[in-house]
Image (cartoon, rainbow, N blue to C red):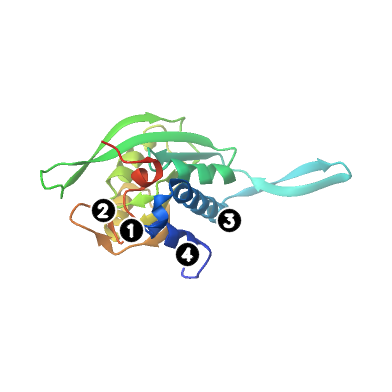
């Protein structure tokens, strides 16, 4: 998370505004735009190598990414965020994990995570980016990290989210290799009794695609 201001402030403000949230298209677009900008920032940290390109009028050398990329997301809330990353890293492989929260008590104050499905190529030797808008308890992200690591050891791991909590970040750090990097557009103070980020912006999946049963 950067200490400096940027246009991302506007996107975050609109995402959080309960009146603005009534337009699902605009909500998804802001999630996607933050993904694009975060992907651009991550691209600055990658390794590059020169390649000769032939134009209609000559040739020149230009530095291009040398890393193999695997962009993974958590269904369903992660889809527009994932799309933003793909707009930048359009040659990346893709992975999808179905990991969702389940309340484990009647009062809906304790949360467990269930991983049901995963579609992924091998992560071995690749730069793995796991992107999910909300990092609340960290349970879904930790479960996704565990599942994706079983496909092969990546060269580098990046975790990207729009909003995180300190508690969630601590959980995810325990599941990551030491040299992994976590990228957040905002870190909110904590969660309410139902494990939703406060002030946050609500349930990202419902706001993007409609309420679920």
Disc 1, disc 2: CB below 8 Å? yes
Residue 126 image position (x, y, % from top left): 50, 39
Describe residue 130's horizontal placement relative to residue 45 as left or right: left
What secondary structure is found at the residue carrying circle 4? helix
Quarter of the picture holding the N terminus:
bottom left
Residue assigned mark 1: 200
What secondary structure is found at the residue carrying circle 2? loop
Residue 181 image position (x, y, % from top left): 43, 54
Residue assigned mark 3: 44
Between discs 1 and 4, the one toward the N terminus: 4
Between discs 4 and 3, the one toward the N terminus: 4
> Residue at (31%, 37%) from the top-left corner?
99
Q: Can residue 179 be seen in this view?
A: no
Between discs 4 and 2, the one toward the N terminus: 4
Q: Nearer the viewer, mark 4 or mark 3?
A: 4
Describe residue 56's horizontal placement relative to residue 183 as left or right: right
Q: Can residue 72 be seen in this view?
A: yes
Tag of residue 209: none
Residue assigned mark 4: 9
For the residues marked 3 and 2, what is the alpha-carbon distance in whole angstroms? Answer: 32 Å
Residue assigned mark 2: 196
**Farthest bottom residue in view:** 4
Between discs 3 and 1, the one toward the N terminus: 3
Crowding near the residue tagged with mark 4, few <14, some 14–19, many ≥20 C-alpha atoms within 10 Å: some
| Residue nearer the viewer, 141 or 7 | 7
What secondary structure is found at the residue carrying circle 3? loop
Residue 56 position by quadrant? top right
């Amino acid at each position: 998370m950067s200490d400096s201001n940027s246009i991302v402030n506007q996107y975050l403000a609109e995402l959080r505004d309960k009146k603005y949230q009534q337009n699902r298209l605009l909500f998804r677009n802001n999630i996607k735009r933050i993904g694009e900008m975060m992907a651009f920032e991550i691209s600055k940290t990658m390794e590059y190598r020169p390649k000769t390109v032939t134009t209609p009028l000559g040739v020149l050398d230009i530095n291009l990414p040398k890393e193999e990329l695997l962009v993974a997301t958590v269904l369903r809330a992660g889809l527009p965020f994932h799309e933003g990353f793909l707009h930048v890293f359009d040659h990346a492989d893709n992975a999808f994990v179905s990991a969702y929260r389940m309340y484990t008590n009647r009062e809906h104050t304790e949360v467990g995570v269930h991983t049901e499905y995963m579609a992924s190529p091998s992560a071995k030797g690749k730069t793995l980016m796991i992107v999910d808008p909300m990092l609340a308890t960290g349970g879904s992200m930790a479960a996704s990290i565990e599942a994706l690591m079983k496909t092969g050891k990546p060269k580098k791991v990046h975790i990207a989210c729009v909003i995180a909590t300190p508690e969630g970040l601590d959980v995810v750090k325990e599941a990551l290799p030491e040299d992994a990097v976590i990228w957040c557009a905002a870190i909110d103070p904590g969660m309410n009794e139902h494990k939703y980020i406060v002030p946050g912006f609500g349930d990202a999946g419902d706001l993007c695609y409609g309420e679920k049963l």
